[in-house]
Amino acid sequence: MFSDGDKSALQDNGFCILPQVLDARALAQARESLNIAAEESRRRGIPTYISDLDPNDANVRVFNLLDLDPLFAELIAHPSATEAVRWLLEDDFIISNFTANIAKPGSRSMAVHSDLAIVIPEPWHAPWSVNVIWCLDDVHADNGATLYLPGSHRFERAKDLPANPKQAMVPFEAEAGSIIIMEGRLWHTSGENRTQAQDRALLFGYYVRSFIRPQWNFNVGLSEATKAQLSPQLGRWLGLGLTANVKPLDGID
């Protein structure tokens, strides 16, 4: 349940953590589905290492999750996630992307960024996006937890960043099965996995206000078979309806 305390934390700190959203059985299923999805992505010719994003291939990226396993459609529309999204963005949102990152031992940190800065130019006056991070493993500083800059969700321009933002960043720490609700203006980066044998798997569900162009074109990226399995509500959130990625008028979709 998305409590008043969670709302205050999200507003004041730019994030909140909801524990135990997935139980042990659901976690095991999600991990298995993600491993299979990574292999299927490579089989389809979609690389899981993107040199523009990560310094080395120990960061495994998986895109187009919704077309790779029906489980991911359940997670992107999970009530624990969408309740938080609705509170921050009201009902005027779409799903911009749903991806995964598996930080294997030796993975290094990507560039510092905010998710809103990637999709819309400054100034960033309002919380127009939110990232829901699904922790499929325990997340801590040593295995590559996401690092964030405290208070940076209040920055309106890139010049507000300190000279060396990464030096002031701290890790999100959460148990497997938790979700981290991260406001889109919070500046962050991936951590380095300094362990010898621990993978750190995260799913990133990115939701934006409906006027913002989505990162992933679901009309093209999803197969007709996948589209046929989606609920009307999820289809609208993915921009598959008549009104695409703008808020539908009353009585129209």
Image (cartoon, rainbow, N blue to C red):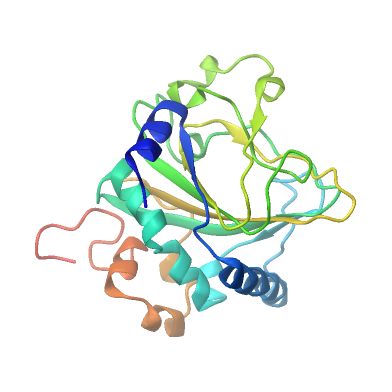
Residue 177: where, in percent of width, then height?
Answer: 57, 58
Give the position of the C terminus as an image quadrant: bottom left
Q: How many numbered discs? A: 0
Q: Is residue 222 visible?
A: yes
Q: Is residue 209 visible?
A: no
Seen in the picture, residue 215 relative to 40 is either above or below; the reply is above
Of 220 and 30, the residue lying toward us: 30
Residue 33: where, in percent of width, then height?
Answer: 63, 74
Seen in the picture, residue 80 relative to 139 is either above or below; the reply is below
Residue 230 horizontal side relative to residue 162, left or right:
left
Residue 232: where, in percent of width, then height?
Answer: 28, 73
Residue 24 horizontal side relative to residue 240, left or right:
right
Residue 112: where, in percent of width, then height?
Answer: 64, 32
Residue furthest right in the image? 196
Residue 45 horizontal side relative to residue 105, left or right:
left
Of 136 and 41, the residue lying toward us: 136
Displayed quadrant of residue 29: bottom right
Residue shown at the point (23%, 67%) measured from the top left: 242
Residue shown at the point (55%, 67%) measured from the top left: 65
Displayed quadrant of residue 101: bottom right
